[in-house]
Image: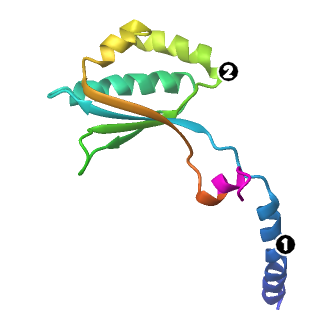
Amino acid sequence: MRQLIAALALLTAAPAVAQTARLAPAPPIGKQQVETYRIAPGKQTAFLRFVARCDEANKLAGLPPRQLFVHVDGANWDFLILQPYDVPADKQAALDAAWVKVGLPSGADFFLAIREFIADHEDTSVRGPTTAADYLATTTAH
């Protein structure tokens, strides 16, 4: 009987909970950097090692690694990387120190070093991840 009463209470409360959820503001949608790389012939392993070093610097700074996607079929890219667009202000100094500790180049040296691996590269900025409903909630069209 207690289980039946608990189930009825839950069913009675569900519409109120759902209404509250609909009234809650949508979570902020972060800006992400999407990068696609077509790697120079024979440089795939070296590129992955370089990205792994970048991820090690992130780890030392308390940041997540990049999300790496490996091409399987279709378009002409080899790897896709998804990462936050901005480094949080409170993590920038730690990331700079980690970058030095791991021995990664910076500035123009980074530009030249990473291009040793790539034949072609594109990047763009996006908002997400999100859902259609959450994104609409941030607009005046909802």
Counting residues from the start of the chain, the first of labels 2 and 1 encountered is 1
In this rendering, the answer to whether 92 lies above or below 32 is: above
Q: Residue at x 61, y 39 (%)?
A: 30
**Horizontal side of residue 125 vs 79, given as left or right:** right
In this rendering, the answer to whether 54 lies above or below 135 is: above
For the C terminus, give its image quadrant: bottom right
Q: Residue at x 55, y 18 (%)?
A: 95
Task: Tell me the number on the disc at residue 16.
Answer: 1
Task: Indicate the quadrant where residue 10 lies.
Answer: bottom right
x and y percentages locating residue 94 in the rendered image: 59, 16
Q: Residue at x 79, y 89 (%)?
A: 4
In this rendering, the answer to whether 133 lies above or below 90 is: below
Is there any visible trace of residue 66 in the rendered image?
Answer: no
Amino acid residing under circle 2? Asp
What element does badge 2 sit on? helix
What element does badge 1 sit on? helix
Task: Tell me the number on the disc at residue 76.
Answer: none
Q: Residue furthest front?
A: 141
x and y percentages locating residue 127 in the rendered image: 57, 42
Task: Tell me the number on the disc at residue 90.
Answer: 2
**Horizontal side of residue 63 vs 28, given as left or right:** left
Is there any visible trace of residue 46 in the rendered image?
Answer: yes
Q: Residues within 10 Å of mark 1 (few under 14, many from 20)?
A: few
For the N terminus, give its image quadrant: bottom right
Q: How is the image coloured?
A: rainbow
Asked whether 103 falls inside the magenta stretch, the response is no
Q: Residue at x 33, y 22 (%)?
A: 50
Which segment did they paint magenta?
A: 134-142
